[in-house]
Amino acid sequence: MRSSKEKNNNRFSDRWPFLFNAVIDSFELREIDLTGRQYTWANSLPTPTYEKLDRVLMSTEWETKFPLVSVQALDRGMSDHTPLILDTGSPAFLGISRQFRFELNWFSREGLHAKVIEIWSRPVKGSNSVQRWNHKLGALRRALRGWASHTNGVYKRKKKSLQLTINDLDIAAEVRNLTELEREQLAQARDDLARLLREEEIKYFQRAKVKDILLGDNNTRYFQLIANGKHRKKKIISLDHDDRKIEGQANLKGYITNFYKELFGEPEESLLTLDDEGVADITQVSDLENALLTSQFTEKEIKDALFQMEHNKAPGPDGFPAEFYQKFWDIIKDDFLLMFQELHSGYLPLFSLNFGVITLIPKVQEANVFLR
């Protein structure tokens, strides 16, 4: 055992857990969180003792290869030990393309600004500003997917080339003095490599979404492991519903889809009514207040609201975070402001705006049900 939480009574000594944890730390191992059970062993006494004696540990190198790994407890049956099954984390839903997500590290790549201007300036069709906006974002997503794929290849090749250059010059410096040109090449290669590694750090910083460590402290590895842990926690293995367990990706997908269709579908008929007497004593807004509330949105109001949005937050359905709209405000603002103008004038159908990404965010340990 590693702590007193892994036993159901107070008969616990810190001596052996301390040594056990010291060994785990010395080998830089991480424990994979167990789902399905709190304990893995029990004796057969009338008042049984439960302990967590079985676990799976992994190295950081192994976690890098299998970032979505999970461990699930099975039924114990007649044994005193609970069998564990290790899942290396294969893709949950095959055949579904991965959702586009703008990467913050793209800001540091050459050509992004020109690419956004090129795509955004192209004319698009649409009966209203929202349709034209969505068509532009769709074209931009497609273009950036290809652009990012190309620049990722360039990045990897350049990183490898810089590492080889630095290594060759380091080896040469061990046996002779470098020439002035070689010293300049070495310094430039190190600067270029530091810039590329900085870009890599930003990528995993975005995925980790941590606030306690400052970006720029060379924490790429830390951010990557945090992101892997978050991905594992988001994985749904099973759900409980009406005294039965729902398992299997197809069954889970169907259950979750139906749950939200019912939750956000047509509401049941309400018996709640309001009459004039019930609202007569509610303070009414004045004509001046009403004019202010119903006045046209100003560019300053819209821009201030946009630029007050927090950074490094999950994007909406379009895949673009707040940083993108802030960075390219001068490029996209005319189309952005037009949506507010049409909304205010009543020309914009509201259903065009009512879209969102629904995710299950566990608020308790071992979350296994959907609550309304």
Image: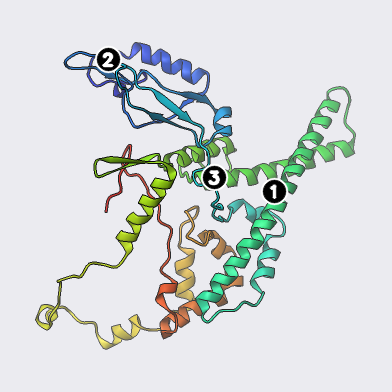
**Is 255 placed left or right of 150 in the picture?**
left
Which of discs 1 and 2 lies nearer the camera? The answer is 1
As shown in the figure, which amino acid type bears the numbered disc 1?
Asn
Q: Pick the residue in front: 53 or 342.
A: 53
**Of all residues shown, which one is farthest toward the left?**
277
As shown in the figure, which amino acid type bears the numbered disc 3?
Phe
The way the protein has been coloured in the rendering is: rainbow
Residues at circles 1 and 3 in contact by the CB criterion of under 8 Å: no
Image position, residue 63 (x, y; %): 54, 31
Give the numbered dot on residue 12. Answer: 2
Per the image, the residue denoted by label 1 is 152
Neighbour class for label 1 at 10 Å: few (<14), some, many (≥20)? Answer: some
Q: Return the disc, 1 or 2, that comes first in the chain's sequence.
A: 2
Q: How far apart are marks 1 and 2 (CA)?
A: 52 Å
Instruction: Tell me which residue sits at (32%, 29%) in the image.
Output: 37
Q: Distance between the residues labelled 3 and 2?
A: 39 Å
As shown in the figure, which amino acid type bears the numbered disc 2?
Phe
Image position, residue 43 (x, y; %): 26, 14
Secondary structure, mark 2, is loop
Instruction: Tell me which residue sits at (31%, 27%) in the image.
Output: 38
Image position, residue 325 (x, y; %): 55, 65
Per the image, the residue denoted by label 3 is 205
Which of discs 1 and 3 lies nearer the camera? The answer is 1
Q: Return the disc, 3 or 2, that comes first in the chain's sequence.
A: 2
Neighbour class for label 3 at 10 Å: few (<14), some, many (≥20)? Answer: many
